[in-house]
Image (cartoon, rainbow, N blue to C red):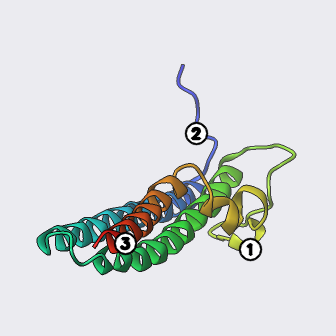
Amino acid sequence: MAEENKFNDNEMKHLEFIQNAISRLGANSFQMKGWAIAIFAAALALFAATGGVEASYLFMAIIPALLLWFLDAYYLQQERKFRGIYDDVAQASGENKQDVQLFAMPLNLYADGKYSYLNVFWSKTVWPLYLVMIAGGAIGGVIMHNIR
């Protein structure tokens, strides 16, 4: 016997809207990581093309990596908030359920704890990539600047 759908058409459409926002934000976050790696690789290629003489190329890669880290964390924060909304809309009952009206996306209800910007900024899926690039560029730049 098949389980009956506990959501009406409008509730299903609301969940689909939320899921589409989650998908877009996840794709944006993925693109930020791709851009950061591409820019850092370009800086390394420029550094190598100068024969390792221009350490400034390594330093120049730090600024875009830092900016993309902030932007990536923002997209992931928004994604987490939409996931919270999705979970609350999808729950039939429960004490943690927020009161979310049909077709509403109240992001302001999801501000603390796992939804906070700093929590996302230092999450294990974000900080290792960017911190390694920034530290690598800084340390490599200092070492190469002092060698020549």
* For residue 148, side relative to residue 70 (left or right): left
SS type, badge 2 = loop
Query: How far separated are the C-alphas under marks 2 and 3?
Result: 67 Å
SS type, badge 1 = helix
Please name whichever residue, 144 or 105, is drawn nearer the observer in this view of the structure. 144
* For residue 50, side relative to residue 114 (left or right): left
Please name whichever residue, 50 or 42, is drawn nearer the observer in this view of the structure. 50
Q: Earlier in the sequence, mark 2 or mark 1?
A: 2
Kind of residue at disc 2: Asn
Q: Quadrant of the C terminus?
A: bottom left
Numbered tag placed on residue 5 in the rendering: 2
Kind of residue at disc 3: Asn
Residue 124 in the image, given as x and y percentages of width and height? 57, 49
Residue 118 in the image, given as x and y percentages of width and height? 68, 66
Kind of residue at disc 1: Asn
**Eyeballing the image, is 103 above or below 90?**
below
Residue 63 in the image, given as x and y percentages of width and height? 43, 79
Numbered tag placed on residue 146 in the rendering: 3
- How many residues crowd mark 3 within 10 Å: few (<14), some (14–19), many (20+)? few
Please name whichever residue, 30 or 132, is drawn nearer the observer in this view of the structure. 132
Numbered tag placed on residue 108 in the rendering: 1
